[in-house]
Amino acid sequence: MAHWIWYPGDFEFYLGLRVTSARKEREKQIIPDWKLEMFNCNVMFRSTVDLSADTVVKIQSTGSVCVRIDYKWYSPIDKDNKVALPKGRHILVVNVYNPHQLPSLFIDSHEVITNSSWKVSCDNVHWKSVGCWNFTDAALPPTEYRLPTRLIFPIESESVNGGTLYDFGTETFGYLSLADAVGEGMIILYLGESRSEALDKEHCLTYEKINVNSKIPAEVTAEHSAGFRYVYCEIAECEASFESLQLYYEYLPLENKGGFCCSDTMLNKIYEISLRTLRLTTREFFIDGVKRDRWVWGGDSAQSYLLNFYSFFDNEVCKRTIRFLRGKNPVLNHINTIQSYTMFWFVGLYDYYLYTGDKNFIIEMLPDAKSFMDNFCLKRTDERGFLVTMPADWVFVDWSDITVNGFLSFTQVLFAGALKCLENLCEVAGDSVAAERYDALYTNIVQNIFKTFWNESMGCLIHTDLPKYDHCVTRYSNMFAVIFGLFDRDQQTRVIHSVLLNLNVPSITTPYMKLYELMAFGELGLHKEMHEFVQSYWGGMVNLDCTTFWETYEPEKSGDEHYAMYEGLRYGKSLCHSWGAGPLLIFGKYYLGVSPTAPAYSRFTVKPELNLIENFSGKVPVPDGEIRVAFDNKVLTVENASDGIGTFLQGDLRHEIAGQTKMVYDCKKGVIHSQDLINECSAV
Amino acid sequence: MAHWIWYPGDFEFYLGLRVTSARKEREKQIIPDWKLEMFNCNVMFRSTVDLSADTVVKIQSTGSVCVRIDYKWYSPIDKDNKVALPKGRHILVVNVYNPHQLPSLFIDSHEVITNSSWKVSCDNVHWKSVGCWNFTDAALPPTEYRLPTRLIFPIESESVNGGTLYDFGTETFGYLSLADAVGEGMIILYLGESRSEALDKEHCLTYEKINVNSKIPAEVTAEHSAGFRYVYCEIAECEASFESLQLYYEYLPLENKGGFCCSDTMLNKIYEISLRTLRLTTREFFIDGVKRDRWVWGGDSAQSYLLNFYSFFDNEVCKRTIRFLRGKNPVLNHINTIQSYTMFWFVGLYDYYLYTGDKNFIIEMLPDAKSFMDNFCLKRTDERGFLVTMPADWVFVDWSDITVNGFLSFTQVLFAGALKCLENLCEVAGDSVAAERYDALYTNIVQNIFKTFWNESMGCLIHTDLPKYDHCVTRYSNMFAVIFGLFDRDQQTRVIHSVLLNLNVPSITTPYMKLYELMAFGELGLHKEMHEFVQSYWGGMVNLDCTTFWETYEPEKSGDEHYAMYEGLRYGKSLCHSWGAGPLLIFGKYYLGVSPTAPAYSRFTVKPELNLIENFSGKVPVPDGEIRVAFDNKVLTVENASDGIGTFLQGDLRHEIAGQTKMVYDCKKGVIHSQDLINECSAV
């Protein structure tokens, strides 16, 4: 089947410009201070064609075209964009040039068809496989790509201060629209993720101005999309009016492939709100928040990949995000200017592979991954192999008040994790020479991490290597060292008490780092503590009637204090932030207990937590099916509706679950039954 | 004074896209098969401002803007694009984002003014001095840059085959326009650089289609510009008609600063035609030809710089061309994919410095020059230091039928020249470490050139290192070795006879390489032979009534045969080709004999050729004035209207000409008088 084809990555850069430039706060457009990549404007597509007869093909493109056959002089193109090709075997090269839009190509004739087998170059030297996706309609080139919308309405409205406050019931996203608008004037819609924000005309972070100019009632829709729950509007002094407010809700079509439901109402709410949060922030790319920044961040998105694997399992949005974040060579700065976000890029790429088993994508990205490491990261290391902080680096760890001076153990542990992930990816692609090289670097940096940061008397990694902070401990490096498996058993035990369960170590205030903390808990079997944290932290937001999870949450704050962030902006905080959706992973990986141990869940473990909730059922999507886990306080059922092989773990019990079989475990008796899944009907 | 500012190079890339994409032949747009650079779409401008009071400044930009003061949260911008700045010393950062057009910035307030002192970055890490030029009008940003036009008319028209043939008298360029066009229909104007081409509707390389749709007579102008002399039009079957044909002649304003006039009518014609040729091809950039390709080529332009220094002495068009050709990092292929064109880039940059003394530009370009050499060229060398041919390289020497297999002496001699030029530029910028490094590479490659290519029995450099061609000699490497001073006296003498004056060595058919051949003649004192070549070669084209000089000229051809080129295209040859204008340099450097020996003519030589023409007068522009040379067959006058110091050379005579003095030399008596130029009135 014919596909629109382009230079790989260019679709993402093109789309990324559109997404990134959409951040608008009141009258201000806000532009990131890192490099934004442009697509290549002059792209050469090449294929060898074998024609049984002289033929004429139609060239469709987004841009100007010129055609050469066997590298001869340019072929004539008629006014219908048709080119005559001679019978026989020929090399066909089609240039597409467009400095304004993504150059792409579509040919769908009998013997010449654009598809993933074509090669592409922007310099006539380096040829790659083309980029393509599901654009198979000649009339819909990739430049026309838009998320779909559907019309929704506020669930209630009330009169406040002479205006009307509309409530959409939950956080939402899209293009506001006035039904039956009439007259001439500017309608201002003040937006709020909170009621307070929408009513605070002076300080709400976003508003929409809609120009009405119609003698007869007509629909008028805002030019920009926005993320919000409430809309406030005063039309008293305006010469224009409208009948009702509506929203073209814009969304990425996503199937809810995961599931979790249990006897604890709060957990059910947390699951549902997490899912809404992730759904709203999963769009052209994984973005951080829907009100702001609406940008793609390396740290946020690496977490979103994981959450996605326990919910929508959408590979494409992961790939788009990974390509966009990587950008082009030369790499001039860390991803989003943040050191750790560069590291998360490598970790995220490995996670993507582990969950999806998509080797083709790893082969596509490995040259970029290696050059990113070799020509950028490794050029910024000291004699210990530590990543050095350069003047323009943003040393972001988390939104908490900690020093970022000196070499941080957090950064170096993540760097070690990145090297290990890259090593693994090289193995996947069969590049064992590079794998060995990264392994040596990994071994070296891990040694130096312990030499530099491990405090034997305190029993933990200290925060920084600066002598004046030699007793400063934070959770970050210790929890990532758990996750990356850097500690031995003894060290783990010590870190549990010296850091993880030590209330004197400052607590984490963002769901972002909270997730990693809980993952460390989960890895160490601290499920009870994990459970308490989920209930108190995410439950704390639920108790404040959130409909999506927030960028930060500090329980000690109250009322509108919760909404402020960033240099005192009264509503600066994002109340729908992708990294708020962490429970999706916690429920799937540590409650249902399903986790891949080999790519694409060809091997996985099922280690459900049976001591915290009376009963639960849920499912975890895998590339070729799903794993369903249900518990009724007596019997645990695991249905392996996939071809992978699961290992059920419970205490000392270890049982292999073959593909397409169901395991029933009687908890009281400790007895296991298995049966084929065929002819079984599953329902979660 | 306030200037529009941008990221350095971006103006050239932006303009370059416009120029490069203008090549159209009949229905085909022709797109180069090398990388076309895009401008940066997200640019940060930075300046430290010192404000005596709170102030409000207006931000003008080509793109969306956001502003930060002292790296704090984004400042509000009102609807008139005004931003409030607080009193005191602050760092002002203004982002300009535009994926469609060059992002640029203009601020012209009391204490905040955009100018060359601002810094700019596209990644927030690497800061450079901004790019700017003569855009000082707030209403005319660089995106509005267009060459000026003026209306001109055909000098005659005649009826041919039922249509009308218009003749503009000479080759010209611009937008064709129909005066008082009326009716409804498509007017087709067939264009020709030759009469034959315009009349050959089926094969002429370019035509213009102009849509007329007007009930009352109105002017309609073509959308595209074109280069041509003749226009043929048949409107018999068309429902539209027009009163007269006109042309919006488009040109770069250039002052004719050089001059040459003599007793030989043919030489005067050659000078005039050369000047027209160069004028037409000196535009936004130095382009190759006005009919085709209208592209910027590394070889052609390096020659144009030299010709420009003996005529218009326009620095800006040189700088634009050099920046555009260099492109951005990473360099992925040779300039225009041609090895030697990369080498000419270095040579051209050095020539630019030698003639202009523009050290600032060298400081701007040196990092790009070094990285081009280090990260690209030197990565493609063998153990002898020779440049290796990679699969995608176009080994273009000249349009002649010679082998390009093996290592060519031509390429390696040019590579040596490039290394020497880069070494010199490093010295200029005070980078003696790099200079030493390039010097060592230069010394090594020169040794290996002689070891590999010098044939002692033949007394010349052979063409290639392939054994089967061990007696193949071409002029190219030998003449460049003369120009770059690689030969000792003995070798020079041998090469004169074994190659330069040896009729068995194939003659050169392009003015491109002809110029270098004549420069070698000039350097070796073979003025008589040089003179004969100018008369026969360029004179040969004059005798065919050319009005501009051609891309190639082969005297043995006749009639319309002269117009064919490129895979049998009947009118494929460009009849107005920049590299046809070589006599401008020959007259200035080898007839008038003026040549810089130190940057910006602070030192120069005057070595006029007094044995070939009865009398002549002329002038050579220098950065701070001009050098006038006149000869009336008895007395030679040299007026040094500059502050540089000239050295007059004639036979064994050597005389220093101080700045702002005039030297009179009585040729018969061999007597020299000098006098101050002040109060002198000069006329050439």
Image (cartoon, coloured by chain):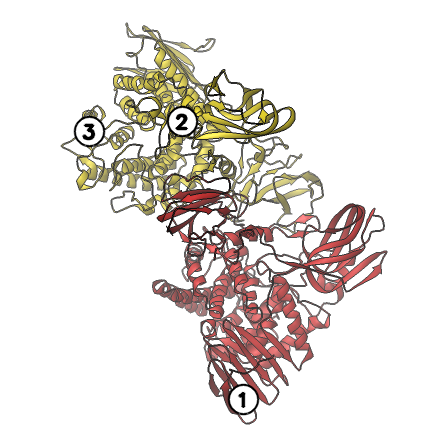
Chain colours: A yellow, B red
Q: In this view of the protein, which residue sits in the foreground, B334 or A394?
A: A394
Q: Which comes sooner in the sequence, label 2 or label 3?
A: 3
Residue highlighted by disc 2: A578
Disc number placed over residue A653 in the picture, else none: none
Q: Quadrant of the C terminus of chain A?
A: top left
Q: Residues within 10 Å of mark 1 (few under 14, many from 20)?
A: some
Residue A318: image quadrant is top left
**Disc 1 on helix, strand or loop?**
strand
Residue B580: image quadrant is bottom right
**Disc 3 on helix, strand or loop?**
helix
Look at the image and tell me whether residue A369 can be seen: yes
Q: Position of residue B177 (x, y in %)?
A: 73, 54
Q: Nearer the viewer, mark 2 or mark 3?
A: 2
Question: Which amino acid, by three-letter code, is at mark 2?
Answer: Ser
Residue highlighted by disc 3: A491
| Relative to A428, B58 lies left or right | right
**Disc 2 on helix, strand or loop?**
helix
Question: Which amino acid, by three-letter code, is at mark 3?
Answer: Gln
Q: Quadrant of the N terminus of chain A?
A: top right
For mark 1, name the chain.
Answer: B
Residue highlighted by disc 1: B665
Please tell me if label 1 and label 3 are on a single chain.
no
Q: Nearer the viewer, mark 1 or mark 3?
A: 1
